[in-house]
Amino acid sequence: MSEIARLHHESVGDVEIVRVVGEVDASNGSMLTEELFGAVSNQARAVVLDLSNTTYIDSSGINLIFDVAAGVRSRRQQLRLVVVPRSFVAQVLSTVSIDESVPVDGVLADALEALQAR
Amino acid sequence: MTRDPSIQEESTSTEQAIARLEDVQRVTESALSYLNPDELLTELLERVVEILQVDTAAVLLVEDDGRTLAARAAKGLEEEVERGFRLPIGRGFAGRVAATRQPVVIEDLERSPIEVINPLLRERGIRSLLGVPLVVEGQLIGVLHVGSLIQREFRDSDAELLQLVGDRVALEIERSRLAVQDRIAQTLQRDLLPSRLPRLPGLRMAGRYIPAATESAIGGDWYDVIQLGHRRLGLAIGDVAGHGMPAATYMGQLRSALRAYALDVEAAGEVLRKLARFAEAEHSRMATLIYGTLNLDTWALEFARAGHPYPLLIRADGSASFLTDASGPPLGTGGAFSYESEVVTLEPGDTLLFYTDGLIERRGEQLSDGEAALVEAVADAPEDPELKCTSIISRLTKGIEVADDIAALLVQSVGLEERLSVEVPSAPRELAGIRHLLRRWVAANGGTDDDCAAVAIAVTEACANAIEHAFGPRDETIEITAELEADLVTITIRDRGAWREPRREHRGRGIPVMREFMDEVEIETGEDGTTVELRRRVGSSPQ
């Protein structure tokens, strides 16, 4: 089975950035959620989930975001999403008005700015 | 005592010997050829005991290490085989025979000038021994020895007779060993070829392997189709020089190495470069090869060629041309390991034929004649890939005893038709492949990028639901049909699972997503499963 998505992980100060590169569907959604929690430190102040390089996402991806949001909340961490405006991913996420639950930025720099990451 | 010069020649016994030898030959030649090697040896030893009027006979064969003799068959000394008796060449009685490649006689075991290692010979009460080497085409393959319980003066004539018998035995052993090897090579070859080719919408394939007319010419030809994720397909054909076991095993190695590199490296030329380095490190025989990857989105085939015959491209209009731009040396010939690749895009109706030289090479003919004959055969062949393959091969091999094996792989692009119908396993890992297929189908039917993305997600959601509904030990499948009427696309996803309530609080988000991207979504749940119908107008009009 070929891997259809990979996580890339990096830190800027106490903000952790996780990029989802590839496709998210029912075959890998919950695996990616677990992998993501494993990758993010308890000590981080905030997490940025960057979906700029996510080429496909569906309701499994929506579930992933809600699961991550719940997990991050329970750790008292902040979460921001990066979604390219008017992209396919943006259209999918609009079906659940994701921006009412998680703050969304168009580019990574804006997310880091909002979190005052250093 | 070896070759005692005092032993007198006896002409009468030589005549007798020839008479007895005829006996041996009669037995060894035909009736025994059906026996397996071990049965054959046992049978031959019984004959030897009878003909030479001795009490024991044994065959020891040289092991693969070339330094050890191992008891393989015995008459009157059966324990020698049962105990797995082995001795190094050069030591002991049989070891001496093997080392000198001369007949060796021990007249009286009790006073033997030669060290006797095998305790069994004494346990059995053997007094006299005569041994001869088994040699085939200058190669020592073992030792045949006979023993007598009463002291006996083996004469030169006895040694000559035993040597003649030994020569027959050696030939029989070698013949049956080669026959076994050929059978193994044949099996190996068969097992290394794809048992069935993947079935992909828009693509039709056929593969053939024809062994050479003579059994021992089972060779190193192979073809392979490698699935590289959902969007690419690896295609390979190759020909290892030589025949029989060694060629077949090396072919197996190359095939595995190629598969490994293909999964790891995208560019066909780079895959061949790596394979050429592998071949160089193996110091093995020469091989020619074509490897290519077919992009299932664009239908572009990028291939590299290592000294292999040119692939033949047959366009939908029937025109045929050899693709000659890809270049590079055969594997195993040293050199720079540089492979220029060539790209050809397959349009619907185009056929690409890969083959090995056995298809076009004829003794005493120019290669260009063979190529011309191939083009001719292709022109008259039917459209269907399986029939086409059969027709081309039978026409080119008609009336010819095929001296070399032949492999052929035929790939035909048929385009995605207005109606698509597939059945896929009900498993999450299939989802990516399903949506790439639907994306291609929508694109092929005039859909925009947005249409492709919309259909892809709606179908993935519907299938993910179907997979979640599927339960039980049966191998569930999902049926997907896609149809186009004017600019309206209708996709039907049917499963045989029972509807279950969403398992978790936030399951069931799939349906709103389907509605977001489709003009119409209908879900019907019945006794025998669930059917989802998705509709969307496709084309230039913006959504």
Image (cartoon, coloured by chain):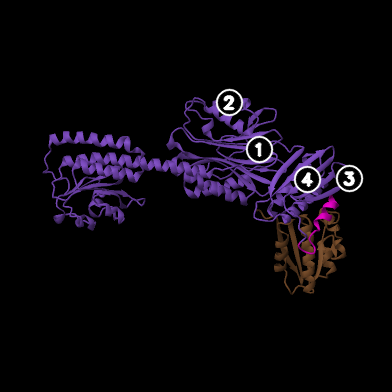
Chain colours: A brown, B purple
Q: What amino acid is found at the position of numbered circle 1 in the picture?
A: Arg
Write the start and end of the magenta stretch as one range.
B503-518
The answer to whether marks 4 and 2 sit on the same chain is yes
Q: What amino acid is found at the position of numbered circle 3 in the picture?
A: Pro
Q: Nearer the viewer, residue B518 or B221?
A: B518
Q: Earlier in the sequence, mark 1 or mark 2?
A: 1
Around disc 3, counting alpha carbons within 10 Å, would you say few (fewer than 14), some (14 to 19), or many (20 or more)? Answer: few
Q: Secondary structure at mark 2?
A: helix
> In the image, residue A9 lies at what x, y percent?
72, 64
Residue that badge 1 annotates? B204
The answer to whether marks 1 and 3 sit on the same chain is yes
Quadrant for the C terminus of chain A in the image? bottom right
Residue that badge 3 annotates? B542
Q: Marks 1 and 2, how far apart in space? A: 25 Å
Quarter-wise, where is residue B535 in the image? top right
Task: Say whether residue B516 is magenta.
Answer: yes
Q: Secondary structure at mark 4?
A: strand
Q: Marks 4 and 2, how far apart in space? A: 48 Å
Residue that badge 4 annotates? B492
